[in-house]
Image (spheres, rainbow, N blue to C red):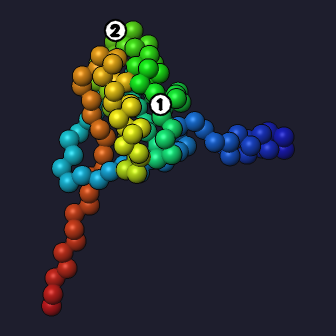
């Protein structure tokens, strides 16, 4: 019984970054980004409420903090020098700009924004 209660409690606790949904912008012709699924990929998530996560770590969105955190990530020689940005469609541009400036200050020049593919319009036939 105690194990069941503990399991229930841990299942309902909010998890940082993984339990939060991001509404990605939709595009008509997305390009596949298989590198974004790598375990060591530098994935930056920008939430609509202004929270910023680099990998699984929440940070304060300032240019210096973003650059400093990304510089730590780049110390590993195996890491691809590309940032994958997962920005909510309703995120504030000011937050996105701060993150992009921090990415630039860290020396990363390859940046990809992740998006969803739009669903094709359904054509109905007239009979």
- Which image quarter holds the C terminus? bottom left
Kind of element beneath mark 1:
loop
Q: Which mark is residue 83?
A: none
Kind of element beneath mark 2:
loop
Which residue is the extreme one toward the right? 1
Which residue is the extreme one toward the bottom? 127
Q: Is residue 65 left or right of residue 43?
A: right
Crowdedness near tag 2: few (<14), some (14–19) or many (≥20) residues, C-alpha within 10 Å: few
Residue 67: image x %, image y %?
40, 19
**Above or below, comparing residue 32 to residue 121 in the picture:** above
Crowdedness near tag 1: few (<14), some (14–19) or many (≥20) residues, C-alpha within 10 Å: many
Residue 49: image x %, image y %?
51, 46
User: What is the C-alpha distance between the residues marked 1 and 2?
Assistant: 25 Å
Return the residue at label 1. 61
Return the residue at label 2. 77
Residue 29: image x %, image y %?
18, 50
Q: Quadrant of residue 73?
A: top left
Which sits in the foreground, 35 or 54?
54
Q: Is residue 47 among the parts visible in the rendering?
A: yes
Q: Is residue 49 left or right of residue 7?
A: left
**Above or below, comparing residue 75 to residue 10 in the picture:** above
Q: Is residue 123 left or right of residue 62?
A: left
């Amino acid at each position: 019984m105690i194990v069941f209660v503990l399991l229930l409690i841990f299942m309902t606790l909010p998890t940082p970054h993984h339990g939060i949904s991001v509404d990605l912008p939709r595009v008509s012709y997305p390009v596949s980004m298989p590198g974004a699924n790598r375990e060591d990929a530098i994935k930056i998530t920008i939430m609509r409420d202004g929270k910023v996560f680099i990998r699984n770590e929440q940070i304060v969105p300032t240019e210096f903090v973003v650059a400093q955190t990304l510089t730590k990530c780049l110390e590993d020689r195996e890491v691809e020098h590309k940032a994958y940005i997962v920005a909510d469609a309703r995120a504030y541009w000011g937050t996105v700009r701060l993150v992009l400036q921090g990415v630039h200050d860290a020396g990363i020049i390859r940046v990809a924004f992740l998006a969803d593919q739009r669903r094709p319009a359904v054509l109905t036939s007239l009979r």
